[in-house]
Amino acid sequence: MTKNFFFILIFFVFFLQKADAQSFLRVSGHDIVDENNQKIIFKGMGLGGWMLQEPYMLQLSGATGPQYDIEAKIETLVGKENKEKFYNAWYENHTNKRDIDSLAAWGFNSIRLPMHYRLFTLPIEKEPVNGQNTWLEKGFQMTDSLLKWCADNKMYLILDLHAAPGGQGRDGNISDRDPSKPSLWESAENKQKTIELWKKLAERYANEKWIGGYDLLNEPNWNFTEGAHPNGLDEKNNQAVWDFYIELTNEIRKIDKNHIIYVEGNGWATNFTGMPQAWDKNLVINFHGYWNPNDQASIQNYLDLREKYNLPLWMSESGENSNQWFYERTKLLEDNKIGWAWWPHKKIASVVGPLWAKITPEYEHIVSYWRNGGEDIPSADFAMKTFMQIAENLKIENCEFHPDVIDALFRQKVQNSAKPYKKHTLPCKINAVDYDMGQHEIAYKDKDYRNIGGHGSQQWNNGWQYRNDGVDVGKDAQTSEFYVSSFEEGEWIQFTVNVSETKAYNLKLNVLTDKKTSEISIEFSDRKSPLLISVEKNNSWQIFEKQKINLKKGVLSIKIKIKKGTLNLKSLEFS
């Protein structure tokens, strides 16, 4: 009896351990599966800018460089104590529970956390005892809070070491690398600190179900052989990267046998040359994708890797393009059973993410001073008030929400239709920039409608403000009103409206054109023939009117199309 009880107890303990291990995400062939063996396709968001600031996210391109330089410039203006006060406000306001709740409500099922090692431990040159590690609670506490918010929403959290000790690439804006100090690849001490950091993270989160895994190094970009591209794009000898990944994996597995390991290639996570066969049973190939056409050929090399190594794929970073590109990219990935994480959820004065943190004239003044110099040095009081206002603007309730970005990432793949950007009930005034959301040639048509040009590219869009579609949007300098600009022959925008009652309406169009005579066609879904309005050349905003348009009660679409010429359109008003 005692002997039987002993064997039953051993079996019970084994069963519980096995059941517990199965409660984590794991790799099964080409797929990531959950505890119920259901395939998981990540639809995630990267929290770029929270723990690690990149200059372009703060509208600082050309004014400063990596975060260590941003911090130095801020400290020069306001002092060390006030700098720390600003960064504490930044961390508190940039990402909090309300942000994660919102991301979950919008449809995201996972979060990728870009971590800066300096929030978790000291740089090697600042360690009181050489070779030892001083652990800082700030980073761990931030991660703990984020994990709780994710768990509350049943979202997976993937930890991403975005800035490793010393920096893992020559692109310092990404990894906050100081080229005057040894990089990760040039320093045994930095490598060891990276190993110890991952071990510390594994100890803390080994048994956390909602940790989706460990992204060991973000975008290594380094040439290990003379003559290769400095960022490793054409590097043929990536052995140092793979050897380090294997070492990291082995050390993590001594502590945590539960969580998936994600590995990125060299050359900003695009170059997987020399990758050895899978060294761990829970391994995922992790690539990034920017500035390329969205066709099968653009991901075929990654699909080939999936077949060769029999491992899942994850595209853990993409974005910064146009809404049409977002729709095309996520559809391409999901059609090929590849999960994704977008980048990022919040920036200062940018339409390409879900949230726009407002910029201020005072902040622009400081940026101009950093960029151009001069004798008009901002005072400490002025600068501190400015920085704290920017931190206040980061709160989600103070941000401008861009529903068109969310619509492109989610709805447009399942609904091949237009959706109102804002509710319009006639009679009313409709701002032209509030045309419908939807794919190109469904909600709008523009000659240049997708952006594959790179950061800050204006070639595809003459305004690139208010919304992230191909439709050009300008801003009236006198009234600060947005308007559809460079509205050219053959282009159109559509509005879905609700007509409150059947009757005759008058229509007024607010138009500006300094070109020759233009012609506008207005098509109503409940009328067979379009209305035509001729617009003479004018050098200021003018009203062009069409009277007694009979409309039936109910929902209808209105398409405004340029038949001839080019003009700017601010609004249409039904009365």
Image (tube, rainbow, N blue to C red):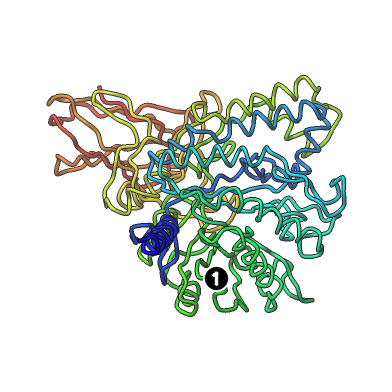
**Whole-percent x and y of residue 170?**
74, 60
Instruction: Report the quarter where the C terminus lies.
Output: top left
| Relative to 305, residue 90 above or below | above
Q: Residue at x 65, y 40 (%)?
A: 59
Please tell me which residue lies in front, 156 or 252.
Answer: 252
| Relative to 566, residue 248 above or below | below
Q: Amino acid at mark 1?
A: Asp
Q: Is residue 339 visible?
A: no
Please tell me which residue lies in front, 425 or 255.
Answer: 255
Bin the neighbour count of mark 1 within 10 Å (Cα to Cα): few under 14, some 14-19, many 20 and up.
Answer: few
Please tell me which residue lies in front, 496 or 103.
Answer: 103
* Residue 426 found in image quarter: top left
| Relative to 483, residue 329 above or below | below
Q: Is residue 307 visible?
A: yes
| Relative to 415, residue 94 above or below | above
- The residue at the far top in this view is 381
The residue where tag 1 is placed is 280
Please tell me which residue lies in front, 373 or 13.
Answer: 13
